[in-house]
Amino acid sequence: MAKRRSGIAGAFTSAHTLGTALVIGALALTLAALLIPVSLFERVANAGPSIEVGPPATFTDDGRGTLDTQYGPLTALDRDFVRRVRLAGLWEGPAGRQAIERGSSEEMRTAGEHLVDGHALLDEMSVNAGRELGIDMPTQPNEQQQGFLNQFSAASGAEYEYLFANILRRAHGQVFGLVAAVRHSTENSMVRELADQANETVLDHITHLELTGLVDYALLTD
């Protein structure tokens, strides 16, 4: 009987070990997919105005390795995440203010308000994290983000609202998985707190962009 129990326990342990390895492998593949640059430029025909959606944010290693801080280890991924939270606010805040002014529906204006309010909080948290953790922070949108703002400014009426809802919805969907990956892996309490808030904010923004009724879900599955 003892040998039988030992055999069962050994089999259970082996199965558990294999299951754990598969889960870890899946997580690694998911993170790799999030961090590998993928061309996602698209033209959508017969679904509204032409729209170009740029590639997702990719991980940038600053070469400083993992640093010790009073809040816990700080990895290159942690630092890149803090910078990207700040970068998001540098273009999504202005985009939200524009939607408040130009939106023809209450849903559009509400989506703009949520972008402005959400990034006001994330900006404060990310700037504070950058200061506390010694991270150099961006001060203006990157080229791709400025391109999105230029698209919004050049459009008008229904075309503007379509571009606003779909570019921002796609951008938020791309970053959602990255926020979860950072929240899962970070050992730094300040980065963890920022990831918690970013997760809540991104989901809120996704929800209100979808409530405009303008999101083309075909863009999200390609």
Image (tube, rainbow, N blue to C red):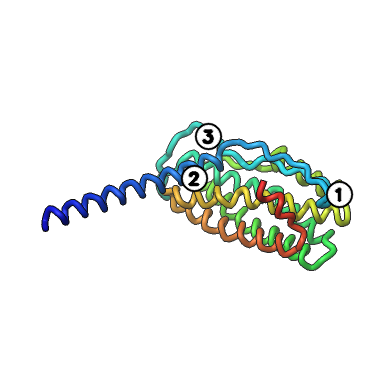
SS for dot 1: loop
Residue extending furthest toward the bottom: 106
Q: Give the spatial CA distance, label 3 vs label 1.
A: 36 Å
Q: Which mark is residue 155?
A: 1
Among the two numbered marks 3 and 1 on one chain, the one whose residue lies closer to the N terminus: 3
What residue type is disc 3 on? Asp
On the image, the x and y values in percent for residue 75 come to: 46, 41
Res. 80 in view = yes
On the image, the x and y values in percent for residue 153 come to: 84, 48
Q: Residues within 10 Å of mark 3 (few under 14, many from 20)?
A: few
Task: Give the residue displayed 52% in from the left and 54% down from the top.
Answer: 195
Res. 134 in view = no
Q: Residues within 10 Å of mark 1 (few under 14, many from 20)?
A: some
Closer to the camera, 161 or 196?
161
The mark lying in front, picked from 2 and 1, is 1
What residue type is disc 1 on? Ala
| Quadrant showing the N terminus | bottom left
Among the two numbered marks 2 and 1 on one chain, the one whose residue lies closer to the N terminus: 2
Residue extending furthest toward the left: 2
Task: Give the residue displayed 74% in from the left and 57% down from the top.
Answer: 215
The mark lying in front, picked from 3 and 1, is 1
SS for dot 2: helix
Q: Residue 61 carries which label?
A: 3
Residue, disc 2: 133
Q: Give the spatial CA distance, label 2 vs label 1.
A: 40 Å
On the image, the x and y values in percent for residue 177 come to: 55, 50
